[in-house]
């Protein structure tokens, strides 16, 4: 088994993901727009490449995690990327983009004989280190089968299959982030009312997050909101992801009053 | 130990609570505005009373669970109620009211030498039958000590102490209901976007409610929202409770944009 793969994007999630892969024995050819971020990986044996296409081998595997639709599209359409990936190449895309963009890029790959699967990741950098990531994925079965061991090596604790249609796993990621944002903001609002009425918010959330709301999200954000008086929304979820959910809902005429409100609140903050 | 107590309010929660108390060996003197609702209890040995005050004995215990501020106040101020409860009497109040009303009624009891403790209940009728109720309570310690065995007999799985200041446990109940409403509505919104985009909402919620949102509230309302296309808000939480939370937030100037939105959505529905 050839353990050489391409890895594009060494941001706050990408970097520790690449570390996990190297620790699992994969030889990485890495690319990042700000090249200096690759240095600690190069010191451990990774190869730094000058262009996204240079990380790719024909019929091989490339993983990417960049910021948004535009940055992912610019990777895929960069000179030589798709041509080089070619027949039987696999792109495991972990960026949270719009389902529409995911489908568009999957089509582009198919035109070149390669496979695009989407595997957006739930998890903060701490969860990468602890290998407690949750990964919904979708795309052609063969691609998912090849991707699975890499996702596991990278730190996936749970991998959830949403079928062969690209876009579905991305939507699940957007929905998950929306529910996180809604839960975090609602707790923040609740804690504000409690505090100002002289009720101990820690005791209150201790009761609720040990019973009705005994879920990881409520426990972690419960701690965050009782500690400070302001909630930094960007700490919870990126505003761009809420925007993508709204954008996905519009053409199908699905009502999104809570997403709209959260987006407005983030915009004002 | 005298196991005779007063019990006021035989609605969809009050009735099964009274049943649990009788099964635990308590002799109930019951009152309900619609008297006929008491019949099945009378058949099992409960005494039906014509007035709230008739359920009360001096120095004894009376429990109540009615609809709102006005109905609870009318019980407490009904002829002879406080006079008869008198010295060392205990009123265990389980209605979800405003913290303000709870404090006002606690004062009235104190003026007559009796104690008012608040013990609003989290739990649908199914949870009463399964004895899985969660009860935040607050009030004078002596009163809480006397109340505890009754709450346990009634079906409390967990009792959470919010101190001696009446109003605190009521606020916790209002906050809990708000968080339930927010979670339920957000899931409903998310499921709508998923369905209209051709993503299986059951698979999506199965993933989310078994991981990040692995809490009883998400599991139970997750099932509700994937089964139907409309969410009956009144099934989740009473609109009056959201109104009470908003009312509690106003004088202390705590922002409640999510509560406001949910209230408006319920009003329109």
Image (cartoon, coloured by chain):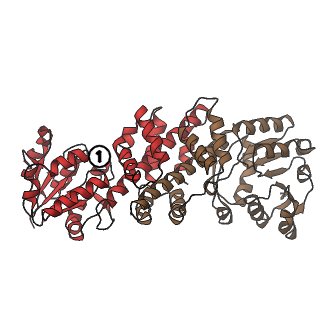
Chain colours: A red, B brown
Please indicate whether residue B231 sits to the left or right of residue A48 in the image: right
Q: Mark 1 points at which residue?
A: A125
How packed is label 1: few (under 14 Cα within 10 Å), some, or many (20 or more)? Answer: some
Q: Quadrant of the C terminus of chain A?
A: top left
Measured along the vertical axis of the image, is residue A220 above or below residue B188? Answer: above
Q: Quadrant of the N terminus of chain A?
A: bottom left
Residue A162 image point, x, y percent: 33, 65
Measured along the vertical axis of the image, is residue A78 above or below residue A142? Answer: above
Residue A235 at least partly seen: yes
Residue B131 image point, x, y percent: 66, 63
Please indicate whether residue A228 sits to the left or right of residue B232 in the image: left
The residue lying at 63 percent from left, 44 percent from top is B242
Which of A163/B267 is in front?
B267
Residue A210 at least partly seen: no
Which of A206/A124 is in front?
A124
Residue A155 image point, x, y percent: 26, 56
Looking at the rendered structure, the number of numbered marks drawn on it comes to 1
Image-quadrant location for residue A159: bottom left
The residue lying at 47 percent from left, 38 percent from top is A225
The residue lying at 43 percent from left, 63 percent from top is B201
Measured along the vertical axis of the image, is residue A222 above or below residue B22? Answer: above
Image-quadrant location for residue A22: bottom left
Label 1: chain?
A
Please indicate whether residue A105 sits to the left or right of residue B225 in the image: left
Q: What element carries label 1?
A: helix
Which of A49/B92 is in front?
A49
């Amino acid at each position: 088994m050839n353990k050489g793969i391409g890895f594009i994007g060494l941001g706050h999630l990408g970097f520790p993901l690449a570390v996990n892969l190297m620790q699992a024995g994969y030889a990485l050819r890495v690319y990042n727009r700000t090249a200096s971020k690759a240095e600690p990986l190069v010191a451990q044996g990774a190869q730094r490449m000058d262009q996204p296409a240079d990380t790719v081998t024909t019929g091989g595997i490339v993983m990417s995690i960049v910021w948004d639709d535009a940055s992912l599209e610019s990777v895929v359409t960069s000179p030589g990327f798709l041509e080089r990936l070619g027949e039987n190449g696999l792109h495991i895309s972990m960026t949270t983009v719009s389902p529409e963009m995911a489908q568009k890029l999957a089509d582009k790959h198919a035109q070149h004989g390669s496979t695009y699967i989407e595997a957006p990741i739930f998890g903060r950098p701490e969860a990468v280190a602890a290998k407690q990531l949750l990964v919904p994925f979708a795309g052609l079965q063969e691609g998912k089968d090849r991707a699975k061991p890499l996702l596991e090596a990278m730190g996936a604790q749970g991998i959830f299959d949403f079928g062969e249609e690209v876009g579905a796993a991305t939507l699940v990621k957007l929905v998950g982030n929306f529910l996180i944002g809604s839960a975090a903001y609602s707790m923040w609002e609740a804690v504000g009312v409690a505090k100002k009425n002289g009720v101990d918010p820690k005791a209150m959330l201790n009761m609720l997050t040990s019973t009705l709301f005994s879920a990881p999200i409520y426990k972690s954000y419960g701690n965050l909101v009782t500690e400070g008086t302001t909630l930094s929304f960007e700490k919870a979820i990126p505003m761009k992801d809420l925007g993508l959910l709204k954008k996905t809902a519009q053409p199908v005429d699905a009502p999104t009053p809570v997403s709209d409100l959260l987006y407005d609140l983030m915009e004002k903050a």
